[in-house]
Image: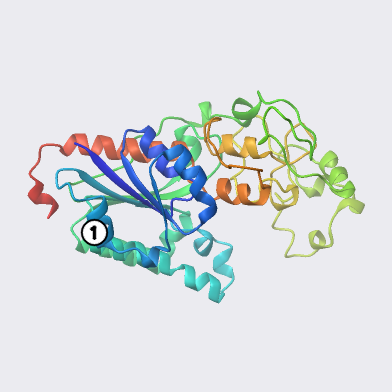
Amino acid sequence: MRTSAIDLFCGVGGLSYGLKKAGITVDAGIDLDETCQYAYEQNVKTDFLLKDISKVRGSEIKKTYWSNKEEVKILAGCAPCQPFSTHSNKIKTDKRTKKWRLIAEFQRLIEETNPDIVTMENVPNLANQKIFKDFVKFLEKKKYSISYSNVYCPDYGIPQKRRRLVLLASKYGEINLIPKTHSKENYVTLKQAIGHLPPVEAGEIIKSDPLHWTTKLSDINLKRMKASKPNGTWLDWSDELKLACHVKNTGKTYKSVYGRMSWNEPSSTITTQFYNFGTGRFGHPKQNRALTIREAAILQTFPDTYKFFETEPFIKRLGIHIGNAVPVELGVVIGKSIKQHIKRYHGKKRSILV
């Protein structure tokens, strides 16, 4: 059966590209960030709707993309995760509160479009929030079969210690993620993922690959980098290299900041500031620099051919685009799970979907 997926909060297309790679037809992505449009259209090669999700109506989706009653309709989405992160929940701000509405908008569109299958991807902490529990209850009332779990990305061959909440819901019947493909003994390591790339200095630009570059280091941060060990902490430094916050009790819990990664295990979770040595464990295991854009893209499992920009690469914007993306291979896992589910229930009467 033909599938038709609509990807809400699509960004530059990590989830959409993964779904397509798994054999799911993606008919449109929706996002309000105009800087994502070029990458999405160039790589996913489908419609990009530049709209605030609150302005999108279910009737619009049904009329434009879901007029064929015989296709399996899939509504997918990864609402921006910042308001649901552990760190954000320690800080109550109006800005964070406003972003909670995005889950409610997702729910509204399910109500208005009645898709056959729903999938959501977000940070693990979302599962502890009332808004998510209410979302699950809503799906249950709409007669969806639901499963959700916290996925450890290395279990599916993704070379990054990223943990994500993945929800699947279907009106066909029971639906689950495919079994894990990797175990600790054969996780894809950082060296296996990026070890083939040529060495590069902090701030150096290689003409053969405009994405293989990262920010310069200040003199003091270069000294800190040289004093850092793979999987070590700033406790390895001499006192003159430590920051004032390190000697405070509040700073002692952030030991991975200014850290080097290890060749022999998956990377740290890629965030939007992976190129900044001081924002996490983003130091290269051997070279005195933070991750390059290319390295982060690989760790997010984007193919080398992925087109992120049309003119000059802007590192802050690319950091946001790559760091916020659903890893492509996680999108593949979700897509394969949906494909297997459809195959299992294919042929059953459509009345079960009403």
Which residue appears farthest toward the right when viewing the image? 240
Scheme by which the image is coloured? rainbow
Q: Is residue 139 visible?
A: no
222, 302: nearer the viewer = 302
Q: Is residue 129 above or below residue 292?
A: below
Which residue appears farthest toward the bottom when viewing the image? 94
Q: Residue at x 57, y 45 (%)?
A: 322
State the image quarter where residue 296 is shown: top right
Which residue appears farthest toward the top when viewing the image? 196
Q: x, y percentage for residue 241? A: 88, 51
Question: Left of 236 or right of it: where is 301?
Answer: left
Q: Is residue 103 above or below residue 149?
A: below
Q: x, y percentage for residue 271? A: 60, 49
Going by the numbered disc 1, the residue's amino acid type is Thr
Kindly identify which residue carries mark 1.
113
Q: x, y percentage for residue 93? A: 57, 75
Judged from the image, the secondary structure of the residue bearing numbered disc 1 is helix
Q: Residue at x 82, y 61 (%)?
A: 247
Q: Can residue 349 be seen in this view?
A: yes
